[in-house]
Image (cartoon, grey):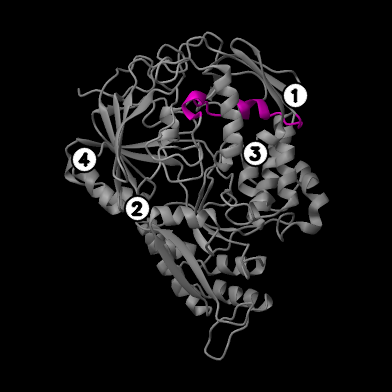
């Protein structure tokens, strides 16, 4: 996006891999919930999340050490002019699908067109920006864009490529479970039991084994995914030796529960991987499509009623800091206090539509650490009064329609942490006269209701990278207010936010890009759409001692591309 790639044209391997890692072994992971699809590219169904990263490839691929830099994977070369108005890719002659057939230009063009029309919502934002896509040679194609956006060649390079011939005469968007897409990646589905397990096997004839981008990666012969009803059962399976590794995002659990005999004996190793990525946002999202959550005063009241200091002490031992903004823990995060300089200049044209605090400065409310949290609850009650939500003679808060206010929280079955947090939160809202009702549903119901935005409050996780760009439209664009299946769960419609995204993708200099992201961060936080929880500066992985990873870990830490991609098995 800016400057030059860090790696030279003749690089041997990525800087954070072991280029001489041995091949072999099986790694077993646990997932909660279930699965009813093995097509990760459509809206229908719930596939195992790991499958998309292990079985499929794109024209370009990234290094976990370099934001905004891509290297050739299926493509051996890429060409684009200074204004990025078009991009031309030339495919590697040796590129093959897992069935041995060559990856062709026709496959690439079909994949762009089909995913853009019938694929998951994350693939539908690019096609309207494409003026034309055409073959220019036996192994080359050119994509011309109709929108000034410097990120578009990179986005095009990351679109997955599927096999066109597999889907001729078939319904791609509604294919049955057994119709597994054919990819060009290192792994294929060897077997599966619906909702219970999936076995992925490394393709011994994988075409990219000798690529510098792949050297030292994809080392395990087999990767097995086991599915459990909830996280507690999954953890017990790990303790029993049935799983190879587990991730843990709770510092208190890491300190108190990971002390079983296998750890004491050295059979299981506790690893902490430092990272430099943004915090992203983890918490509970408020659906502003629904009154009274469409009023920022009500959302602020719900934030004040959420007794974070007490909940954090109860849930994590108080050792994990609260997420202060979407891009915190990085240079892209908003700065405290009033907006200044380029950030202020970007926001001021939208001053009339900005939520309170975007220009003046916004910070999350802080409680006194006690269960009663009196000062914040008094402030919350006053905000609810100002929003016109009166209290009846029995102490119940009345909604806009005059009936008692009931908010529904949507949780997945097995989300024990979310349930424990909500149980504490419910007591605070009762003191404000608000009833909090919890709907715990299975994985399929959760996905269906989330897709249709059928909730008042639900658990929320949005990862942010050091190279945010067009994907932000899927998160915050006003189209997502009514269009099902987007990632705009809060129902946000902000011309200012969309303008900041435009500035991000058209910026010619890093400092202009950073200013636009910081401005967006302010708009998001001042919108009060999410009740933030806590974050970590380390990723925690407990694993069987026969599995290993390089000690020179990437800046992104444990994100797709790390575990299991660069790990290897060695019994001694």
Within 10 Å of the Cα at label 3, are there few (<14), some (14-19), or many (20+) other Cα atoms?
Answer: some
The residue tagged 4 is 242
Instruction: Name the quadrant of the N terminus.
Output: top right
Disc 3, disc 2: CB below 8 Å? no
Q: Nearer the viewer, mark 3 or mark 2?
A: 3
Of 396 and 306, nearer the camera is: 396
Check the image and report above or below for 190 versus 9: below
The residue tagged 3 is 125
User: How far is mark 3 from mark 2, CA to CA?
Assistant: 40 Å
Disc 2, disc 4: CB below 8 Å? no
User: How far is mark 2 from mark 1, CA to CA?
Assistant: 50 Å
Check the image and report above or below for 138 versus 517: above
Q: Nearer the viewer, mark 2 or mark 1?
A: 1
**Closer to the N terminus: mark 3 or mark 1?**
1
Q: Secondary structure at mark 1?
A: loop
User: How far is mark 2 from mark 4, CA to CA?
Assistant: 24 Å
The residue tagged 2 is 252
Image side of residue 385 versus residue 41, left or right: right
**Closer to the N terminus: mark 3 or mark 2?**
3
Which range of residues does the magenta coloring cover? Answer: 146-168
All told, the count of numbered labels is 4
**Closer to the N terminus: mark 2 or mark 1?**
1
Image side of residue 492 versus residue 228, left or right: right
Percent position (x, y) of residue 370? 45, 70
Percent position (x, y) of residue 15? 46, 19
Q: Secondary structure at mark 2?
A: helix
Percent position (x, y) of residue 540? 37, 41
Q: Nearer the viewer, mark 1 or mark 4?
A: 1
The residue tagged 1 is 85
């Amino acid at each position: 996006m800016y400057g030059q790639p860090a790696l030279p044209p003749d690089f041997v391997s990525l800087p954070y891999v072991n280029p001489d890692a041995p091949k072999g072994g099986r790694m077993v992971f646990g997932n909660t919930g279930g699965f009813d699809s093995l097509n990760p590219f459509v809206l229908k169904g719930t596939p195992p999340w790991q499958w998309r990263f292990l079985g499929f490839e794109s024209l370009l691929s990234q290094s976990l050490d370099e934001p905004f830099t891509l290297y050739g994977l299926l493509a051996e070369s890429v060409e684009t002019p200074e204004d990025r108005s078009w991009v031309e890719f030339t495919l590697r002659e040796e590129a093959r699908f897992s069935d041995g057939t060559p990856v062709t230009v026709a496959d690439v063009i079909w994949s762009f067109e089909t995913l853009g029309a019938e694929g998951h919502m994350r693939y539908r934002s690019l096609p309207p920006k494409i003026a034309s896509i055409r073959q220019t040679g036996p192994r080359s194609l050119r994509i011309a864009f109709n929108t000034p956006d410097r990120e578009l060649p990179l986005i095009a390079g990351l679109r997955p490529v599927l096999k066109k011939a597999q889907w001729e005469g078939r319904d791609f968007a509604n294919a049955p479970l057994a119709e597994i897409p054919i990819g060009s990646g290192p792994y294929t589905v060897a077997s599966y039991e619906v909702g219970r397990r999936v076995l992925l096997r490394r393709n011994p004839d994988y075409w990219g084994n000798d690529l510098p981008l792949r050297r030292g990666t994809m080392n395990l012969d087999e990767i097995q995914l086991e599915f459990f009803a909830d996280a507690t059962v999954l953890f017990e399976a790990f303790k029993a030796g049935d799983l190879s590794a587990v991730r843990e995002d709770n510092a208190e659990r890491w300190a108190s529960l990971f002390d079983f005999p296998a750890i004491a004996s050295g059979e299981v190793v506790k690893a902490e991987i430092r990272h430099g990525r943004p915090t992203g946002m983890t918490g509970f999202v408020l659906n502003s499509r629904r009154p009274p959550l469409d009023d920022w005063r009500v959302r602020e009241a719900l934030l004040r009623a959420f007794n974070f200091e007490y909940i954090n002490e109860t849930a994590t031992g108080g050792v994990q800091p609260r997420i202060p903004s979407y891009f915190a823990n990085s240079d892209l995060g908003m700065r405290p206090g009033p907006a200044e300089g380029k950030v202020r200049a970007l926001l001021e044209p939208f001053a009339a539509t900005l939520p309170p605090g975007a220009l003046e400065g916004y910070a999350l409310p802080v409680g006194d650490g006690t269960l009663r949290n009196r000062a914040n609850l008094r402030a919350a009650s006053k905000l609810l009064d100002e929003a016109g939500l009166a209290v009846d003679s029995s102490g119940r808060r009345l909604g806009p329609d005059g009936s008692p206010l009931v908010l529904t929280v949507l949780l997945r079955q097995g989300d024990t942490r979310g349930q424990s947090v909500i149980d504490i939160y419910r007591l605070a809202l009762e003191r404000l006269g608000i009833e909090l009702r919890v709907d715990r549903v299975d994985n399929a119901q959760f996905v269906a209701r989330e897709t249709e935005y059928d909730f008042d409050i639900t658990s929320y996780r949005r990862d942010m990278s050091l190279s945010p760009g067009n994907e932000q439209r899927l998160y915050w664009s006003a189209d997502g207010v009514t269009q099902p299946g987007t990632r705009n769960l809060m129902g946000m419609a902000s011309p200012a936010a969309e303008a900041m995204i435009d500035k991000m993708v058209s910026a010619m200099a890093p400092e202009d890009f950073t200013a636009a992201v910081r401005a967006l961060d302010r708009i998001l936080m001042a919108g009060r759409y999410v009740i933030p929880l806590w974050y970590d500066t380390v990723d925690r992985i407990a694993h069987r001692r026969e599995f290993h990873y390089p000690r020179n870990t990437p800046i992104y830490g444990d994100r797709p591309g790390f575990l299991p991609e660069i790990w290897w098995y060695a019994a001694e």
